[in-house]
Image: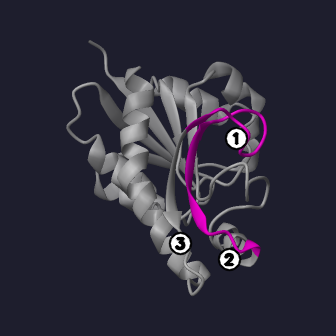
Amino acid sequence: MKKSRIAILASGNGTNAEEIIKYFRNHASIEVILVLSNNVNAFVLERAKKHGITHRAFTKAEFKDSVVLEWLKQYDVTHIVLAGFLWLIPDNLIKHFPNKIINIHPALLPKHGGKGMYGMRVHEAVKISGDVETGITIHLVNEHYDEGKILFQARCSVETNYTPQAIAECVHKLEYEYYPKVIEKWIME
């Protein structure tokens, strides 16, 4: 049986990407084959290198003008996983990978989603709103930020004394625990 081949797109540090790489390292049916970043200085590229995963950075023009799509075809990628990737996915990728692009958002969508809502901005919004719980949402990607079909949500309590940093720590634990497992289930179904 041919393995499913994942490309991870990330913009920053890459902690989720590394958890995904480790989870699928010796998987019988799924492998991480490529890590791509829109940030040439993103630490995720170093993490990919450390694990022997092919990695590349790209420009906005390369992303929109099918260069990235050609790379994905070249490596026979079957699924795309967003792990802290901040740009909107262009139509050419969505059309080529229908229901094959997944993302994780650090809040319970539809709350605290959309353009500009990422990282600490989300946790600050949770704190300001007075939410008593937050969590993660894993969803399919469509042509709009954070509006694809929701596949999974996990929750954690937000205590009144929590700072945005404490909220982030809670959410990160959920991300590391669940994202690789949900990716596996999504691909294997």
Q: Which mark is residue 168?
A: 3
In the image, which residues are magenta? 129-151
Q: Are marks 2 and 3 in contact (CB under 8 Å)?
A: no
- The amino acid beneath tag 3 is Ala
Say which amino acid is labelled 1.
Phe
Residue 181 numbered mark, or none: none
Residue at point 53%, 34% (across, down): 80
Q: Determine the CA span between mark 1 and mark 3.
A: 29 Å
Q: Nearer the viewer, mark 1 or mark 3?
A: 3
The amino acid at mark 2 is Lys
**Residue 144 showing in the rendered view:** yes
Residue at the disc numbered 1: 63
- What is the quadrant of the C terminus in the image? top left
Residue closest to the eye, 67 or 88: 88
Check the image and report above or below for 147 versus 107: above
Q: Which mark is residue 127?
A: 2
Vertical placement of residue 156 versus 71, above or below? below
7 lies left or right of 160: left
At a point 71% along the width and 50% down the height, the residue shown is 87
Q: Quadrant of residue 62?
A: top right
Residue 38, position in %: x, y? Answer: 63, 53
